[in-house]
Amino acid sequence: MKFASITGWGSGMPPAVLTNDDLSTFLDTSDEWITSRTGMKERRISHVSAIEMATVATAQALACAGLDAADLELIIYGGCSNEEAVPNSASGVQYALGARRAAAMDVNTACTSFLYGLATASGMIRTGVVKNAVVIGVELISRYMDWSNRNVAVLFGDGAAAVVVQAGGRDDGVIASVLGCDAEARASLRVRGVGCGYAGRGITFGDTLWDFDGQVIFKRAVKGMSEASLRVLAQAGVTAEDVDLVVPHQANLRIIEAVAKHAGIPMDKVMLTVQKYGNMSSATVPVSLVEALNEGRVKPGSLILMPGFGAGLTYSALLVRWGDRVQPLAVSPRTLPPCEETALAMVQRVRASQDPHGRSQAGLLGATLVDRQAGLTDDRDS
Ligand code: UT7
C-alpha cells in the first residue's frame, strides 16, 4: 500500500471585503447580532468565476508542490455553487491549466465536498489508480444568494483553496477518515431553485429560495462533527491530547467552540477564519489550512484534525499527519486580476437582478405542490 502525502497548498481568495455594516445597509441586521451569533465580521465577494478562483488556487498548490500541470493525473473539484452542471467544473480547471492528462471530476457533498474529495483522492492514490491529484474546495455563493433573506445572507462568503496529494513512501497525509450522512435531516438545509427538479416551472436558474432551519442544523452539526472527530481519533489510535491543530468547517464560531469542547481540545489549538471569511462552504477547510501554514501553525509531523458538516446533512472528520515540508517549493505568478468594484457594489448588482417578492417564492411553492402530488417530498418540504 502506498501513502498519499499532501505536498502542495494554495488559495485563490477574492480581495473585496463585505462587512457586517455593509450588510446592515440593506438588511434588518446589525454588526452586534452577526458577531454575537456567528463570530463573523467580514466575508469576501468574488469578482471572478468560481473556476477562475479554483484555477489560481490549483496553480499555487502545484507550484508549492513543484508539480507541473502537465503531470497532474486527477482534479477533484469540491463545491456546491458550480456555474454549470454540464460540463462539470473540474474540466474547466483542467482546460485553464493545460493539465491535459488529468481526469476531472466534481464532488458535491455541500460544505464537506473538500473533505470527501480529499478522502477520495487519498484512497485512489493509495490503491494505485493515480499517482497524484489536486483537491479543490471552492464556492461562489454571492451570485446565487437570496440577498433579501437575513437568516442566510449574512452567513456566507466566496473563496477557494486547493491541496496537491502525491504518492509517497512515508506514512503521512490522511491517516484516518470518517465520512457519513445524517439524511433524516436533509430537508433542514436546502437551496431550492437549483437543479432539474425545478425545470419547466417558470423558475430561472439561480433564482433561489434558501430554506434553512438554523437551529436544527446547529444541533446536528455539533453532534455530527463531534462524533466524527471522536471516531476518527479512535480509528487512528490517538487521543485528543495528541492533536496539534484542528482545522474545522467554519459555519459558526459557536458550533466550532461546541465541537472543540466535546472533543476535549482547547480553542488555542483551533484554526479560526470564520471572523474574516464567514462560511465559504467547501472552501472553509482548505482556506483555513493554507492560512495555518502561512502563519506557521503547521509544523513538520503535526497531527491535524479536520471535522466538517454540510447539506445532506453530510459530515466528515479526517485526521492528517503532516509531512516534513511546511514551506512552498515555489510561488506561481498566477493570481486573480485586480477588482475594480467594492464588495457592496457587486452585491447590489446581484440584488438588482433579483425579485424579492414574487417569482421565486411563488414558483417554488408551486414546484413543491407538484412534488407533493407526485409523492416526491418529505414532511418538511412544504
Ligand atoms: O454550513 C451549513 C450552513 N450553516 C448553517 O445553517 C448555520 C447553522 N445555524 C446557525 O449558525 C445559527 O442557528 C444561526 C446563526 C443561523 C442563527 O443563530 P441562533 O442563535 O440559532 O438564532 P435564532 O435562529 O434563534 O434566531 C433568533 C432571532 C430570530 O428572531 P425572533 O424570531 O427571535 O424574533 C431571527 O429572526 O434572530 C433573528 N435573526 C436575525 N436578526 C438580525 C435571524 N437572522 C438575523 C440577522 N440579523 N441576520
Image (cartoon, grey):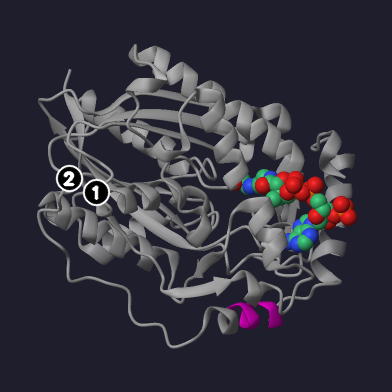
- Whether residue 239 sits left or right of residue 196 in the image: it is left
Amino acid type, callout 1: Gly
Q: Give the quarter of the image for residue 36.
A: bottom right
Identified at 80% across, 72% down, the residue is: 356
Pick the residue in front: 216 or 194: 216
Give the distance between the C-alpha atoms of the residues marked 2 and 1, in whole angstroms. Answer: 8 Å
Q: Which residue is mark 2?
A: 326
Is residue 345 visible to us here? yes
Asked whether, in this view, residue 291 is left or right of residue 109, the answer is left
Q: Earlier in the sequence, mark 2 or mark 1?
A: 1
Residue holding disc 1: 296
Q: Which of labels 2 and 1 is toward the front? A: 1
Q: Identify the main secondary structure in magenta.
A: helix
**Residue type at the position of mark 2:** Val
Q: Which mark is residue 329?
A: none
Q: Are marks 2 and 1 in contact (CB under 8 Å)?
A: yes
Element at label 1: loop
The answer to if 99 sits in the magenta stretch is no
Q: Which stretch appears magenta?
A: 347-352
Who's the residue at 24% across and 42% down the image?
A: 133
Q: Label 2 crowding class (10 Å Cα cut-off): few <14, some 14-19, many 20+?
A: some
Q: Quadrant of the C terminus?
A: top right
